[in-house]
Image (tube, rainbow, N blue to C red):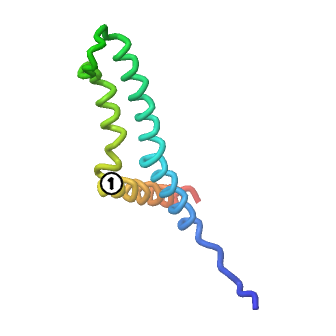
Amino acid sequence: MIKKVKPPKPVTVLTLFTFVVLAGIVFVIIPLVLGLLSVVVGALETMGSNNISGDFSNIVFGNLLWGLAGVPFVHWVLASLFVVVCTLLFVIITVVVDKKFR
């Protein structure tokens, strides 16, 4: 027997899509970009120095960017809460604007 399945409501699809996109940005894109940028900045900071002693304490901005790249994973509860709250705000605003212009 083939059962008829109701298609999901547009708000449900919008919520799921928004959540997936925001979670991907917060947990994949931003850490990836900041991590790669930290490696490049760290390499530039190392090239600018003249010491070969193995002391890498002069890499300041590279370490800072590396720390920022790890923030969503160290504080994953807050990052997840940020994604959920932003998803809800985006969906609520979209629904309100959609009702206003109908």
Relative vertical location of residue 9 with respect to residue 97 in this rendering, above or below:
below
Q: Which residue is most to the top?
A: 50
15 relative to 64 in the view: left or right: right
Relative vertical location of residue 18 with respect to residue 40 in this rendering, above or below:
below
**Residue pictured at 29% horizontal, 54% vertical:** 78
86 relative to 59 in the view: left or right: right
Q: Which residue is most to the right?
A: 1
**Residue 5: horizontal and vertical position, in percent?**
67, 81
Label 1: few (<14), some (14–19) or many (≥20) C-alpha neighbours in 10 Å: few
Q: Total number of numbered labels?
A: 1
Relative vertical location of residue 99 with respect to residue 30 in this rendering, above or below:
below
Q: Which residue is mark 1?
A: 76
**Residue pictured at 46% horizontal, 35% vertical:** 33
- The one of 61 and 79 positioned closer to us in this rendering: 61
Name the quarter where the C terminus is drawn: bottom right
**Residue 92: horizontal and vertical position, in percent?**
44, 60
- The one of 54 and 4 positioned closer to us in this rendering: 54
Give the structural element (helix, strand or loop) at label 1.
Answer: helix
Q: Which residue is most to the bottom?
A: 1
70 relative to 92 in the view: left or right: left
Residue 17, by quadrant, is bottom right
**Residue 15: horizontal and vertical position, in percent?**
50, 62
Name the quarter where the N terminus is drawn: bottom right
- The one of 18 and 73 positioned closer to us in this rendering: 73
Q: For the residue marked with disc 1, what is the amino acid?
A: Trp
Q: Which residue is most to the front?
A: 53
